[in-house]
Amino acid sequence: MTTPVEQIAELFRITEASSLTPRYNIPPSQQILAVRNRPGHEGREMVSLRWGLIPSWSRDAAIGDRLANARAETAAEKPSFRQALRQRRCLIPADGFYEWKKSGGRKEPYYVRLRDGGLFAFAGLWERWRGDEADPLETCSILTTDANDLLRPIHDRMPVILDPADYGPWLDPDLHNPEVVQALLRPFPAERMVAYPVSRLVNDPGRDDRRCTEPEREAAGRPSPPGPERWLF
């Protein structure tokens, strides 16, 4: 997630946005950017959610470690996701993601992005969990679907990338029919995407610089860059 916040606000029609630190390696359990409807349906807002959904009814926050992803085909039936699918959907902006290919007992990382390098959005679900704390914890999950032709040699699943024309219906607070919602959750066209192997540096959750997204040979010979700048909006 390295796109300047001005571009994010423009694409997702957000009138108020705060500062954003560029990120190159965001693992589950960390905070990620999300876009959702404001309370009372008064436009959209940009928020920070912890990646790993904790259902509102759960007694243990540790369940979020197992719910970073939700299968699009069964989300409407699963107790952990069915209410969020009907009432608490969000967009999760990104300009790329990683997938790992099993190769000779190892997992080789690949970076996947749109062919034009543009910003896109995953289909997400969010929840508010109170637990024993005074302040509620807001978390999210990314929906997945069958891999398209580009991703299938790497992995059999891929995150749901929504077409911009579907942002409105996906966030529509009056749309509760799970069958209609699930119809939006399909593999993104393979011809509009590219994927290439990257350095195993990305396997380290503490590594967060632009070398993570560079082709493997380029990243191996490049020194560590300075810390990330901040974009203000």
Image (tube, helix red, strand yellow):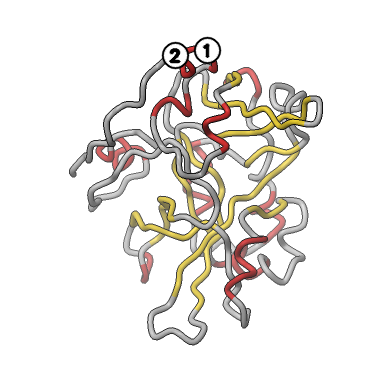
Query: Compared with residue 134, is residue 219 higher up or lower down, i.e. above or below?
Result: above
Question: What is the count of numbered marks?
Answer: 2
Query: Closer to the observer: label 2 or label 1?
Result: 2
Q: From what the image shows, is residue 124 above or below residue 101?
A: below
Judge the density around disc 1: few (<14), some (14-19), many (≥20) Cα neighbours within 10 Å: few
Q: Quadrant of residue 227?
A: top left
- Quadrant assignment for the N terminus: top left
Q: Residue at x 64, y 33 (%)?
A: 99
**Vertical arrangement, residue 76 with respect to residue 229, above or below:** below
Marking on residue 221? 2
Residue 120's place in the image compared with 81, above or below, is: above
The residue identified by callout 1 is 217
Check contact, mark 2 vs mark 1: CB within 8 A. Answer: yes
Label 1: element kind? helix
The quadrant of the rendering that contains the C terminus is top left
Please name the amino acid that badge 1 sits on.
Answer: Arg
Q: Quadrant of residue 45?
A: bottom left
Measured in 3D between alpha carbons, the distance from the residue under mark 2 to the one under mark 1, in whole angstroms, is: 7 Å
- Element type at marker 2? loop
